[in-house]
Amino acid sequence: MRTGRAPPDSVACGREDPMQTDHLARSKKFIKLLRPDMAGAAAQTAITWLKPALKIADHGKPIAQPALTPATLGRLGPLEVRLAQKKQDIKRAQKLRYRVFYKDGTAIADAATLLARRDKDAFDRICDHLLVLDHAAKPSLSGKQPVVGTYRLLRQEIANRHGGFYTENEFDIGGMIARHPRLRFLELGRSCVLPPYRNKRTVELLWHGIWSYVRQHGVDVMIGCASFDGTDPARLALPLSFLHHYASAPEPWRARAHPSRYVEMNRMPKEAVNQKAALRELPPLIKGYLRLGATIGEGAVIDHQFGTTDVLIIMPVSAISSRYIEHFGVDATRHAA
């Protein structure tokens, strides 16, 4: 989730049973289509599970394990996932985001962003920042290991003290949150990974970090925006219609794009949607969220600054497939440091 971007019998939050188990998005046929062998290599990039990684570099020599700190959430070979601890750590995440979103992507930088060469906004100072470091890569001139992936995390209690979630700029989520007053929400946003690291190892470690964070803070629901490249919804008619017909959030979790920004997702009749073709057009991140158990809000939003079409992701922890929770461990021990 750029704003980048864990069934009830698996991990019970002890508060509510929020999902309707007969919803189309959870049907056996739908889940089968989302399997990697059906959806192709792109899905495996999004969410795919590994055998235990050997702590050996490509050239066969052992990799020195990174020194661990309380901020470390896990590691996989030379890669470490951790939380930013200092302002300098956040700046490194912002530099990575600038490179991915602006330098290599389609985002349009204003003068201040061009000068700073960092993607930054007012939310950065109140968010936690998840970083993936590569301890096998050459250190920077400052002696720091490079940041190769990042996610921005904003807990509800912090958002409430500072004017709300970033997602509220695009979607009216207030009613949804109000319907679940006993649940704790977490916003996922500003996710990005350097191209050479867009593989199952890095993605798995990022998700391990998120799951560790979710368990540590008692999070019940994850939300945020996920993006399609491009600002012409007509060219995205197939995947948007697929999400509308097969992955819409059930009524208790329904949230809409703000009226002034609302873009219709129902652009094709259900019988005209080729599900396999639509899945091939879904970005890996959205496909990964669906495989975990996420559903989609009503309406899309055009983000002209970033050159994207955004949809709302809604993912209660209680809806996450039990096999993924078993993979990471209920207590997030899969790749624990």
Image (tube, helix red, strand yellow):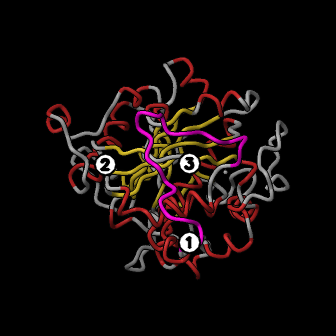
Report the residue at 68% width, 52% height from top: 332
Hey, what amino acid is under mark 1? Ala
Residue annotated with mark 3: 313
Q: Considering depth in this image, is 100 or 181 the residue closer to the camera?
A: 181
Can you see residue 4? no
Q: Element type at marker 3?
A: strand
Q: Element type at marker 2?
A: helix
Hey, what amino acid is under mark 2? Leu
Residue annotated with mark 1: 53
Instruction: Look at the magenta stretch and give its main secondary structure.
Output: loop
CA separation, marks 2 and 1? 25 Å
Residue annotated with mark 2: 96
Q: Local crowd at mark 3 within 10 Å, few (<14), some, or many (≥20)?
A: many
Residue 167 belongs to magenta span: no
**Which span is picked out in magenta?**
250-273
Q: Element type at marker 1?
A: loop
Q: Report the mark closest to the observer, 3 or 2.
A: 3
The image quarter in which residue 334 lies = bottom right
Query: Is residue 335 found left or right of 239 in the rendered image?
Result: right
Q: Where is residue 223 in the image (x, y as percent from the top left)?
A: 57, 42
Q: Earlier in the sequence, mark 2 or mark 1?
A: 1
The image quarter in which residue 336 lies = bottom right
Q: Where is residue 27 in the image (x, y as percent from the top left)?
A: 74, 67
Report the residue at 34% width, 43% height from top: 303
CA separation, marks 3 and 2? 23 Å
Q: Local crowd at mark 1 within 10 Å, few (<14), some, or many (≥20)?
A: few
In the rendered image, the vertical position of residue 156 relative to residue 67, given as above or below? above
In the rendered image, the vertical position of residue 244 relative to residue 56, given as above or below? above
Could you tell me if the residues under marks 3 and 2 are in contact, i.e. CB atoms within 8 Å?
no
Q: Report the mark closest to the observer, 1 or 3.
A: 3
